[in-house]
Amino acid sequence: MSKYVKEVNECLLKIQQGDQAQFEELYKMTANHLRSTAAMYLSNKDFVDDVLSEAYKKVYTYNESFDYEQDGFNWLCKIVQNVALSKNAAEKRAAFLEEEYRKNLELRYLRDEFADAEFNSILSVLDEPDRSIAYRWFFLGETQEEIGRDHVVSKVAVCKRLKRICKKLKNYMDDE
């Protein structure tokens, strides 16, 4: 075991024994190395300090479970690596959700444009409650439960009406 690793292990052991001042010493001793490790694993380098902060929180939380006979520096690096990889995954999820939200807004806009322009003439064959149900179901993307709540009917009743509406619209379009 190298001298550096022994020093890190001594700090971790002292922290386990309740010497909280050693946590600051551990930070001074390892922060630059761990910052480099975080940068190596992160896809967005802007999050290096966030990852480092989260990693030190985990070190503080899980220090009791660390076996000081093992390589403490490697343990710290592994924590930083895991936090960085989790941050990357979270960023990918956030980017995906943002893209999906943007696409959904575009679709809703296109559906509204189409509804206003073309579909109004087709919907005119329906009476007002059915027209409202069809518009809300097909163009606003509301659930049958939401529609039923506003029309004071059950979800099952909305489902049956939608089937009847679809049949009417299909017959109308076939006749055209």
Image (cartoon, rainbow, N blue to C red):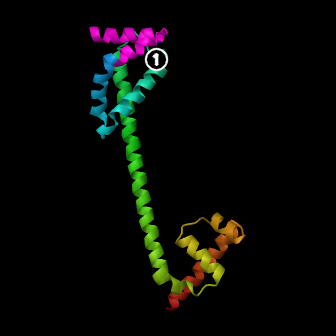
Q: Is residue 22 magenta?
A: yes
Residue at 54 percent across and 67 percent down: it is 141
Q: Is residue 139 left or right of residue 161?
A: left
**Of helix, strand and loop, which one carries label 1?**
helix
The percent position of residue 100, horizontal first and vertical second, equals: 42, 57
Evaluate whether residue 67 shows in this view. Answer: no
Evaluate whether residue 50 shows in this view. Answer: yes
For label 1, the residue is 63
Residue 106 figure quarter: bottom left
The percent position of residue 39, horizontal first and vertical second, equals: 28, 33
Residue 133 figure quarter: bottom right
Determine whether 129 is above or below 53 in the image: below
Determine whether 45 is above or below 146 in the image: above
Residue at 72 percent across and 70 percent down: it is 152
Which residues fall within the magenta stretch? 1-27
Residue 7 figure quarter: top left
Determine whether 49 is above or below 97 in the image: above
Give the overall secondary structure of the magenta segment: helix
The percent position of residue 14, horizontal first and vertical second, equals: 43, 8
Q: Is residue 19 magenta?
A: yes
Number of numbered discs present? 1
Q: Is residue 33 left or right of residue 149?
A: left
Q: Residue furthest bottom?
A: 175
Residue at 36 percent across and 40 percent down: it is 88
Q: Considering depth in this image, is 32 or 145 the residue closer to the camera?
A: 32
Q: Considering depth in this image, is 68 or 23 the residue closer to the camera?
A: 23
Q: Looking at the picture, which amino acid does disc 1 mark?
A: Asn
In the rendered view of the protein, which quadrant contains the N terminus?
top left
Label 1 crowd bin: few (<14), some (14–19), many (20+), radius 10 Å: some
The percent position of residue 50, horizontal first and vertical second, equals: 38, 33
